[in-house]
Image (cartoon, rainbow, N blue to C red):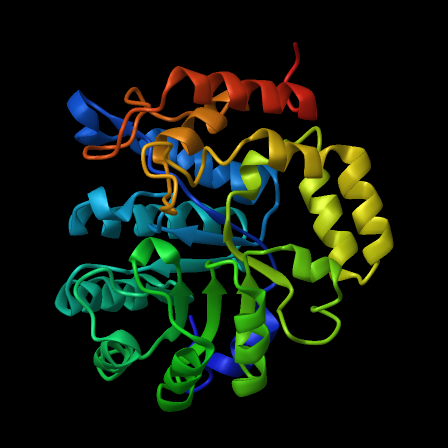
Amino acid sequence: MTNARDARQWARNALRGIGNSLYTPFSGPDGDDIDWDAYRTLVRHCVGTLGHPMLWVTSGVAEFWSLTIAERKKLLEIAIDEARSIDPGVVVQSCTAAMSAKDCLELTQHAEQAGADIVYLQTPMMELHGGEGVLNFFRYIADRTDIALGMFNSPSSGYVLSAQESARIVEEVPAVCATKEGAFRPHQSRMLHELAPDLVIWECDTTVYRAGWLRSGIVGPAQLGTTGYLSETAEKRVLSQYWDLVWNDKLVEAMDFAKESGIDQFELDIRGWFTRYPGRPDYFTHWGGAFKYAASVVGLPIGSYPESRPPQAALPEQARVDIRAAYRRFGLIGA
């Protein structure tokens, strides 16, 4: 863990490689319980089997909005213990987003005490006075903690920060050292880099990496929070090979590899089931049931309750058909 004062220097060196956003394997009636053994297996798979250097814990894929504070604390503690028993240098990123600043503070202070490396605050989801409200939220947390902070600018919050609003947060809160830009607005990420050049930016529109933005220093050499473990197996490490090419500035080779290996086609074949609910097509979501079904297809344990906790909808059969077909075409499972 680094302190707030040294956060930006630390981030430039430490935030590298694939950072896996972990799902929560539920069990019991309506998913009221958590399958802790399945969760430990997931952590060991990401860090040990796949050798990925970063974890992203209790965020959207984990369905943080459905977890109690006690559950979120335990999920982080297990991730730290399991991951660092395999790789002491693994970077553990904890999302402490919550509906109240007090709950967020409690989770952030716990993450600091438990040994997380950095905490990400998603743009708050409650009634919010725009960028000023987000800045006040960050100030409240930063004034009471001493840990590196990151922004998580996601449309699932209902409010997306502009580049200018994010840059003001960076200027006024020294602990803020990184951001996951999840709104698929590359022009805003480019502007944010101009306004806050010390900030490590992960742009979820990954086409910018093929355009040489890493070489230009606009984005950093990391996937801060994705589900890389759903796009490769120990036997077929295609995603790691692809990003190694990108991070080594072999962009033509990377683009050829993405096409020939099936990575590009796989993203199309998934048909947006991870982040789109057909009943609300204009809304970006994290459909936990879809992520977990994909995990089950590649042989990962997901607990005895495979859906999201209420109130999210159950995954329809068409989604299962499409997801399994995508994996079969990609070659990660057999016929």
Residue 265 seen in render: yes
Residue farthest top in this picture: 335
* Rendered-image quadrant of the C terminus: top right
Identity of the residue drawn at 24% across and 52% down: 73
Residue 74: x percent and y percent? 25, 47
Identity of the residue drawn at 36% across and 44% down: 285
Could you say which quadrant of the image residue 17 lies in?
Answer: bottom right
| Left or right for 216, reference 204 | right
Residue 3 seen in render: no
| Left or right for 52, reference 111 | right
Residue 236: x percent and y percent? 71, 31
In this view, the residue in front, 95 or 128, is: 128
Residue 78: x percent and y percent? 34, 46
Could you say which quadrant of the image residue 143 lies in?
Answer: bottom left
In this view, the residue in front, 282 or 8, is: 282
Q: Is residue 277 placed above or below 156 in the rendered structure? A: above
Residue 96: x percent and y percent? 28, 60
Identity of the residue drawn at 52% across and 58% down: 184
* Rendered-image quadrant of the N terminus: bottom left
| Left or right for 281, reference 309 | right
Q: Is residue 117 placed above or below 237 in the rendered structure? A: below
In this view, the residue in front, 112 or 215, is: 215
Could you say which quadrant of the image residue 246 lies in?
Answer: bottom right
Q: How many callouts does the rendering have?
A: 0
Identity of the residue drawn at 37% across and 42% down: 286
